[in-house]
Amino acid sequence: MKPRSLPSPIASTSPTNSSLLRTRLAALAGSLRASSRLLGGAPSLKYDGRVERDADRDPGTIRNNDAFKTSTSPSPSMLFSRYSTLIGLLAVAGSAPALSQASKLNRAVRVAPNHEPAIPRPEQEQAAAKRLAGLLERTNKRPNILWFVIDDMGYGDPGCYGGGAAVGAATPNIDRLAREGLRLTSCYSQQTCTPTRSAVLTGRLPVRTGLTRPILAGDEITQNPWEDELSLARLLSDQGYHTLLTGKWHVGEPEGMRPHDVGFDEYFGFYPAQKEITQSLDARRYPDLVLDESRMRAYEAIAPEDHLVHGFKGGRTEKLEQIESTEDMGRAEKRLADFTVERIAELAKGDKPFFIEHCFMKVHADNFPNPDLGPLSAARFAYKEAVAEVDLHVGEIMAALEAAGVLENTFVFLTSDNGPQMDAWPDAGHTPFRGAKGTTFEGGVRVPGIAYWKGQISAGRESDDPFDLMDLFRTGMTVAGVPMDTLPDDRYFDSIDQTSFLLEDDGQSRRECVFFWWGDTLMAVRMREYKLHLKVVLPSATHMHIDMSTVQDLGLSGWLFNLYIDPREQLAVGHRRNAWLASLGAEARAHAATMRRFPPKDIGLGR
């Protein structure tokens, strides 16, 4: 049965103030018309003066529960500030058809107004469907799904991506997955962790869900972004899967936002990043906090949960051991891996298939070695020890699949949630590309991506075709046999089904474009080997891509790079050496137009 359409949670203006807001937005649009030429737009494009409203909700309030800050409708000036960039994009989009093919370079076809266009690959799609049907007939059980999500691992950290022993931390188990599966060399995340983690579970860009950046200690959000979102975990649970998330969550701690509230049958892990737990324990790194009693009391009022949590669908939540030292944090990764190993052995004996998202706490700073494991890396630095430990646990979990007899019926995908957090150097990873976590240069968003499925994905495959981690949402649905018409039609889904790309020996990606956002700002678009930057994040000091960086507007033209000849994005080819500047601009305008028809929501995170 198709779920009922849900009202959009975007805040709306009151009737008395909407006229003033329209005037201000129209003025903004007028100031941006000239810059539409930068994207190949016509001078006549204009904002039509409409303000999107939620007709099904009282315009004076935003839904919330007791965990969220009550809010009245934003004033026109607040909305103007909040959505100025987005409305500017819509002004540039103007009256261009939202559902037509944006440029002649684009091979994708849109099959529904609320779904991202995909490149038709009928032969490989039919072959993949036949393959899955045959597997189901042989096993009489839907395939299991296992995701490894590593926190902040750089593209150049694993050996199979040029790192490993060469940079002081061998990764034999990750390398084996790549050798025996499909290694993706153009796999893309969002630029920080919370946006990626929400995007893979919803199949929607963070700007649409409101989860545009990590939720930090002291943040007050205005509504529960998960209240009307449909997670892959919920879809698979309804399909008869046991859904489990182990490890880091970092997409909300209040009731209603926890993993076992948003679709997972079971959760075992820590809500925040490990740095948010250990900063109140580490006097060497944070003496101004830890050694000051009054500040510690103030921090405790906003501190994130520091207990290991075991949660269950329906709300039951158990607090287990507390992290009381950096040594405890160092041991936590093994505790989590041991749990996943145990649950695989138990779940494999049952009648249900399983979906496990194993989210490592490491290698996100601040890293602390496990004192019980001894040195694991040649480098001995804390970050390298973390990389080696993650690889160790990947091997243990894969061995658990084999021991349980389910390796051949389990689709495995390994990745990182973003590029390396260079601000924490030397407690940070490596990327050969420009930028790092927090930027939309390749260093911030191009990540390792390995697809493994014994007997289904041939060994030794490699592809540079684009894969967006959001595509795991639709791909997971197909693997699990969830019909696509299960998805509601009142929201936009950015995910593309890439099952046939991953499974077929000569499979090609069905994704034409990858769009890169920072908050509510569209920063860049990649199509084929071309990438057009509309804005860029530039560091003001070495490695400082977050804490000392600026978002910079570009000049007369966007920065267009050919990633095949300039993968480090050093010198834009522009129109002088490339014929597709206007075409990529058209793709950006068409993408922005989807925000008009399916408005994004704002939960108060801002920048």
Image (cartoon, grey):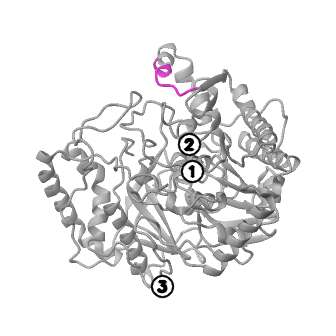
Residue 283 in sight: no
Dot 2 and dot 1 residues touching (CB under 8 Å): yes
Give the quadrant of residue 333: top right
Magenta part mainly helix, strand or loop?
A: loop
In screen coordinates, is 494 left or right of 222? right
Confirm whether the magenta stretch covers residue 474: no
Magenta highlight range: 298-305
Q: Amino acid at mark 2?
A: Gly
Q: CA distance from mark 1 to mark 3?
A: 47 Å
> Percent position (x, y) of residue 113?
40, 68
Residue 20 in sight: yes
Q: CA distance from mark 2 to mark 1?
A: 8 Å
The tag earlier along the polypeptide, 2 or 1, is: 1
User: At x 80% / y 58%, what residue is drawn?
Assistant: 139
Disc sitting over residue 243 in the figure = none
Q: In the rendered view, would you say 124 is above or below 440?
A: below
Instruction: Identify the residue position indicated by label 1 in the image.
Output: 235
Return the residue found at the far right: 403
* Badge 1: residue crowd in 10 Å (few <14, some 14–19, many ≥20): many
Q: Nearer the viewer, mark 3 or mark 2?
A: 2
Disc 1 element: helix
Instruction: Identify the residue position indicated by label 2 in the image.
Output: 263
Disc 3 element: loop
> Percent position (x, y) of residue 464?
65, 72
Instruction: Identify the residue position indicated by label 3 in the image.
Output: 577
Q: In the rendered view, would you say 252 is above or below 174?
A: above
In screen coordinates, is 72 left or right of 292? left
> Percent position (x, y) of residue 205?
46, 56
